[in-house]
Every structure is written in structure tokens, then in C-alpha cells.
Amino acid sequence: MLFFQQKPLPDYLDKDFKKFLVKLLGYKPANFEPYYQAFLHSSYANSKQHLAFRHNERLEFLGDLILDAVIGEFLYEKFPNLDEGNLSRLKTRFVSRKTLNQLADKLNLIDFVAGDFRSGAIPDDVKGNTFEALVGAIFLDIGYKKTRKVVMKNFFDKHLNLFALLNNDDDYKSKLVKWAQKSRKVIRFEAQETRSEIKKEYTVVVYLDDEACGKGVSPNKKAAEQLAAQEACERFYI
């Protein structure tokens, strides 16, 4: 990311960004550059020649993987008697679009997102994506162990009701089926099983009136169905 070394702070960020970031994280980053990129949306980056294709989507990809690992480790340690299916269901509550968007709002991330949005307002999906990009930047700066502490202590524990999140009994499949019946839509779940020498995995796609609306992947078939149903529920705001 040498392109960011031209200036201490890119011109697309507010001058108070560093102060905001230090307060948010609870420490001064050793390297600010990945954080600069975390707040650069493609709609703005690709419209500027000097920033073209230097947006936050790669960091978003990385942050998504790190977040899965952090939450997975947290739940694995907290619930030693839960099987993989129930652990997967719990994990989806932490990393759902709704939860990540809510966190982004509480952390005031949208105040510093550089984007060129047609409506003028930042779309909801950009909020959660920016949060994931931020997690990716934190990981690159301080490594996994410290990132886990920041994510759980400074973000989730401080800004969300973890007890409510853990005890939320959302059954996305049942919710989606009831909505489909009420809306007179034909719903079906199609599952495909893949096996290797070391693991078994299910990929489930949910269809509404023959249109694919959600996809879930998990070693547990029921968990994969819940993931697919959750994606569909979030798509239709159910």
C-alpha cells in the first residue's frame, strides 16, 4: 500500500480521522495506512484516477475471515457443550448484516466513509462492509491475538447487548416459510452435499418462486438452511 505514503492523511478523509480512530481503537496504530483504505468505498475510489481500484473490498474480504475466526473462537470457548450446528447458528447472529450494520452505526463509522452514493445516503450494506474492512485493517496492524481483544471488548461487548444476542431465538427458516406462505410464494430449499477426506459440507440454496434468494454453507445441513434463510430474510427485510 505504498500509494498512501504520499501524504500523512489522504484528502478524502476528515482531518479528525486519526483522533477518531485512536479513541475508537483504544491505541495508536503503528501503521495508519490500512485504516485509510478501510474507509475508502469503491464508488469514490474508482471515480478518482489516483485511487482507482484501491478501495476497501480486499480488506473487507480479509476482515470477514478474521471476524468469523474471532467469533467462532469466542463461542467455542464460551459454550463447550454445543455441537457444530448450534455454534454455527449462534455465529450467524454475531456476523449478520443486521448486527454489523448496527455496530457500524454505534461506532460512527459512516461519519468517515468516503463514497459517492447516488441517493446521498450511505446504503446499509456499506456500513457492515466498512466494519469488516476495519477489522481487516486492525488485523494487519496488530495481529490476530490483539485484534480478537479489540473486536470483542471494544466493539461487541461495549456496544451490543451480548446476552440478548446470545439468547435471541431467531429461527430464520420458520420465519421465512411463514412469510412466504402469507405472501403466496412458493418456497423450497435445495441442498448439495460435498465430501472430502477430512470434512463434509452442505450448500443450501433457498428459492422463492424459482428465484434464488439465499445461500448457506455449513458442515451441518440444518445450520446451512438457517444461513440461507437468514440471507433471504435480510434481503426482504423480514
Image (cartoon, helix red, strand yellow):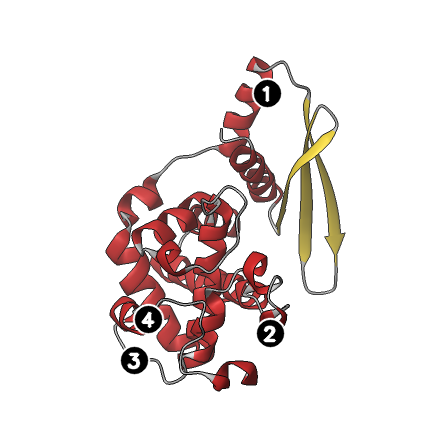
**Kind of residue at disc 3:** Lys
Q: Which mark is residue 180?
A: 1
Which residue corresponds to the image point at 50% horizontal and 81% vertical from the top-left? 4
Which residue corresponds to the image point at 27% horizontal and 46% vertical from the top-left? 163
Q: Which mark is residue 188?
A: none
Which residue corresponds to the image point at 72% horizontal and 30% vertical from the top-left? 211
Identify residue for label 4. 15
Task: Tell me the crowding category of disc 2: few under 14, some 14 to 19, or many 20 or more residues within 10 angstroms, Cα based.
Answer: few
Numbered disc total: 4
- Residue 152 in the image: x percent, y percent? 33, 62
**Kind of residue at disc 1:** Ala
Report helix, strand or loop for mark 2.
helix
Q: Whole-Å distance between the Cαs marked 4 and 1?
A: 48 Å
Question: In the picture shown, does residue 126 fall above or below 232?
Answer: below
Looking at the image, is mark 3 or mark 1 earlier in the sequence? Answer: 3
45 left or right, relative to 95: right
Report helix, strand or loop for mark 3.
loop
- Residue 199 in the image: x percent, y percent? 67, 60
Q: Whole-Å distance between the Cαs marked 3 and 2?
A: 27 Å
Q: Whole-Å distance between the Cαs marked 2 and 1?
A: 47 Å
Looking at the image, is mark 2 or mark 4 earlier in the sequence? Answer: 4
Question: Which sits in the foreground, 235 or 121?
Answer: 121
Identify residue for label 3. 28
Identify residue for label 2. 50
